[in-house]
Image: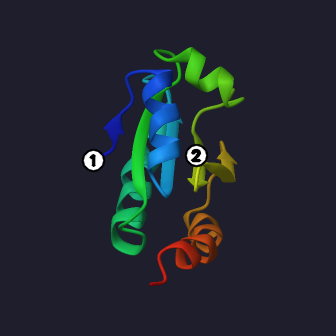
């Protein structure tokens, strides 16, 4: 499923190395997160297989959450070429997320 991040350094390295990265910020106490996470995973696996996915426990890695101004759970950040393109918090619609990822994803992986 999602690779779980262990440090801010690991996240910074992945943002630079991966052409496309989705970070799913959550906490163990967030029930909405537990329902949404497998749906996001399935969407990305089915439609955007080259998009690397990582899971960030905001309560375990508050430095990662703070550095990226993530103060709500769940929050999804999508990076392309190291830059943040998409930010979704709390009420996240999968159709809207899919539409927003499609264009930059197709531009990067069109070859």
Secondary structure, mark 2, is strand
Image: 22 above or below 54: below
Residue 34 appears in the rendering: no
Residue 51 appears in the rendering: yes
Sequence-earlier tag: 2 or 1: 1
Q: Nearer the viewer, residue 30 or 20?
A: 20
Q: Is there a contact, CB below 8 Å, between mark 2 and mark 1?
A: no
The residue under the point 57% across, 24% down is 64
Quarter of the rendering occupied by the C terminus: bottom left
Tag 2 residue: 76
Mark 2–mark 1 distance (CA, rounded to whole Å): 15 Å
Rendering quarter of residue 41:
bottom left
Q: How is the image coloured?
A: rainbow
Q: Where residue 96 sits in the image (x, y, percent)? A: 64, 68
Tag 1 residue: 1
Q: Where residue 85 sits in the image (x, y, percent)? A: 68, 56
Q: Where residue 78 sits in the image (x, y, percent)? A: 58, 52
Q: Which of 71 and 12 is in front in this view?
A: 12
Image: 95 above or below 13: below
Q: Furthest-bottom residue in view?
A: 111
Report crowding for label 1: few under 14, some 14 to 19, many 20 or more residues within 10 A (C-alpha).
few
Q: Furthest-left residue in view?
A: 1
Q: In this view, does 64 lie to the left or right of 111?
A: right
Rendering quarter of residue 48:
bottom left
Secondary structure, mark 1, is loop
Image: 48 above or below 19: below
Q: Which of 22 and 76 is in front in this view?
A: 22
Q: Where residue 86 sits in the image (x, y, percent)? A: 67, 55
The residue under the point 62% across, 71% down is 104
The residue under the point 62% across, 53% down is 92
């Amino acid at each position: 499923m999602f690779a779980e991040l262990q440090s801010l350094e690991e996240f910074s390295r992945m943002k630079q190395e991966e052409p496309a990265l989705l970070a799913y910020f959550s906490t163990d106490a967030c029930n909405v997160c537990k329902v949404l996470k497998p749906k996001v995973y399935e969407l990305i696996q089915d439609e955007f297989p080259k998009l690397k996915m990582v899971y960030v426990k905001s309560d375990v890695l508050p430095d990662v959450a703070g550095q990226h101004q993530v103060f709500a759970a769940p929050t999804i950040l999508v990076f392309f070429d190291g830059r943040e393109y998409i930010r979704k918090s709390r009420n996240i619609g999968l159709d809207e997320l899919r539409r927003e990822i499609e264009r930059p994803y197709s531009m990067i992986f069109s070859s």
